[in-house]
């Protein structure tokens, strides 16, 4: 699973994100939007792999809950949509999700992103050019 915590979102979102993450002890990462039966909620993508992700989000979720995710990965490509994910675990404001349905185009974007990051040295930050 790829882990990094040094992306810098746009300034208008950075202050709100920084407050949320400091209050809940999460690291800054890429922004994501979670859609569920209670409406959309913005969160922070902390880790991502081909099969799932770890999110920092200011909403209570329960294991087994179904979600849709829009992940803004730190690169110049469109967001990756996970049409169906399930909550696998919850720890305070951190949620682990498993991807159940990702369309082919989004799967390719995710695979290309992960492959590009796996070739970088461990200390390279998300906000550094490739």
Image (cartoon, rainbow, N blue to C red):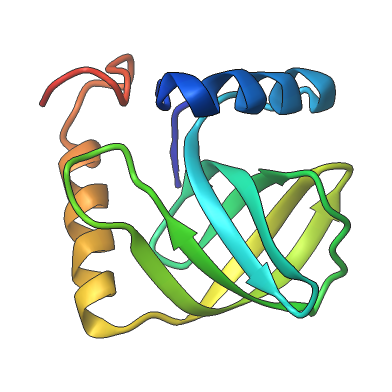
Q: Quadrant of the C terminus?
A: top left
- The residue located at (83%, 55%) in the rendering is 90
- Percent x, y for residue 80? 34, 63
* Above-or-below relation of 128 to 97: above
Q: Residue 2 falls in which quadrant of the image?
A: top left
- Percent x, y for residue 27? 62, 24
Q: Nearer the viewer, residue 23 or 113?
A: 23
Q: Nearer the viewer, residue 89 or 55?
A: 55
- The residue located at (51%, 50%) in the rendering is 32
Q: Residue 102 falls in which quadrant of the image?
A: bottom left
User: Looking at this rendering, what residue extends furthest in the left direction?
Assistant: 130
Q: Is residue 103 left or right of residue 129?
A: right
- The residue located at (63%, 49%) in the rendering is 42
- The residue located at (76%, 80%) in the rendering is 37
* Above-or-below relation of 67 to 53: below
- Percent x, y for residue 71? 43, 55
Q: Is residue 90 left or right of residue 31?
A: right
Q: Is residue 111 left or right of residue 84?
A: left
Q: Is residue 68 left or right of residue 90?
A: left
Q: Residue 121 falls in which quadrant of the image?
A: top left
User: Looking at this rendering, what residue extends furthest in the front direction?
Assistant: 12
- Percent x, y for residue 107? 27, 72
> Is residue 6 something that shows in the picture?
no
* Above-or-below relation of 33 to 21: below
> Is residue 52 something that shows in the picture?
yes
């Amino acid at each position: 699973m790829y882990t990094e915590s040094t992306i810098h979102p746009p300034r208008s979102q950075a202050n709100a994100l920084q407050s949320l993450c400091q209050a809940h002890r999460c690291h800054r990462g890429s922004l994501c939007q979670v859609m569920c039966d209670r409406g959309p909620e913005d969160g922070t993508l902390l880790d991502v792999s081909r099969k799932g992700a770890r999110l920092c989000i200011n909403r209570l979720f329960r294991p087994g809950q179904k979600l849709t995710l829009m992940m803004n990965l730190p690169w110049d490509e469109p967001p990756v949509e996970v049409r169906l994910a399930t909550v696998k675990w919850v720890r305070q404001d951190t949620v682990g999700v498993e991807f159940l349905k990702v369309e082919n185009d989004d799967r390719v974007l995710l695979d290309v992103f992960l492959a590009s990051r796996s070739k970088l040295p461990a200390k390279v930050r998300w906000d550094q050019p490739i």
